[in-house]
Image (tube, rainbow, N blue to C red):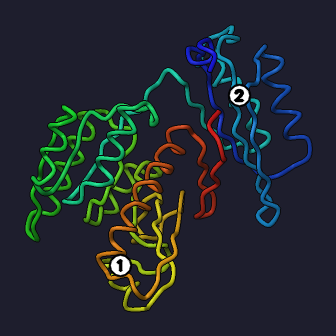
Amino acid sequence: MNHSNIDMKYAVFVIQCPDQKGLVSRISTFFYKKGFNILHCQQHTDIAQNQYFMRLKLDLGCLSSSRKDLERSFEEFGRPLNLEWSVHYSDHIQRIAILVTKSSHCLYDLLLRQQGGEVSCEIPIIISNHPDLDYVADIFRIPFECFPLNHENKCRQELEVRRVLKQHHIDLVVLARYMQILSEEFVKEYEQRVINIHHAFLPAFKGANPYQQASDRGVKMIGATAHYVTADLDGGPVIEQDVQSVTHEHSVEDLKQIGGDIERNVLARAVKAHLENRTIVSNGRTIVFSTGV
């Protein structure tokens, strides 16, 4: 890869609006007149919903005004077109909090990918309701906060978690097998900024013990689902999924081991897609563009 591309500052505009003629031309012309070089453009039209989606990557070296002026101009431009949009700058490194319970495989995987540069983010804190994974945080020299949970202190415990998230200015919360249900208040505060890995191919086998459920039903494929968290348990917009074939010869423990590998990869792909601003939530489902170039 060219080193100049690595150091290049860029902006990503993520846009959705009602579909209408001339959108591509009008949006690209807006940036052309501002003197921008468009590095990459991805788009999708949902004919059934009459919705248009775009991800546009711009070279910020062409920026001749302030970022606020650019955003103000684009807001004025987009108002008649009913554009819903957000802009993300490459020099803003997002901060992730990882929430865990006792399973370590997804945690290890995310930490290794972040350390290797595959997942571009900062991870300033790991939070759990059990002390079991403190040693993992210690290996990677990341602060670890443990807030034990019982029936009497659930509200108070969650308030402590939210306090720590604010303290560390967290952009994205990743539930890496955090086996607790978040309150509606929590989910609303971090709307479309909480990703969960569910160890089943949703919408099948919601809730607890999905591998036991799958074994009991004699399924021939198992999978994992990464989704944005909503107030609907295991019902948020799906970001990534994957499956693998199994047979009647596989025990529940075999399914857990196979499923653990799927979970790691699915969660990592979902987190990467979010960090690269490749996801757009619309009408309860997620548009995920294929690459973050």
Measured from the top left, where is residue 165 in percent x and y? 26, 41
Measured from the top left, where is residue 249 in percent x and y? 40, 86
Point out the tag, 1 or 2, that comes first from the N-terminus: 2
Q: Secondary structure at mark 2?
A: helix
User: In the image, is residue 18 above or below residue 97?
Assistant: below
Q: Residue at x 37, y 56 (%)?
A: 187
Q: Which one is in front, 255 or 170? A: 255
Q: Residue at x 81, y 32 (%)?
A: 27
- Farthest residue toward the bottom? 217
Measured from the top left, where is residue 230 in percent x and y? 43, 63
Counting every numbered tag in the picture gives 2
- Report which residue position mark 2 lands on: 74
Q: Which one is in front, 22 or 220? A: 220
User: In the image, is residue 21 above or below residue 202?
Assistant: above
**Which marked residue is nearer to the observer: mark 1 or mark 2?**
1
- What is the crowding at mark 2: few (fewer than 14 residues within 10 Å), some, or many (at least 20)? some
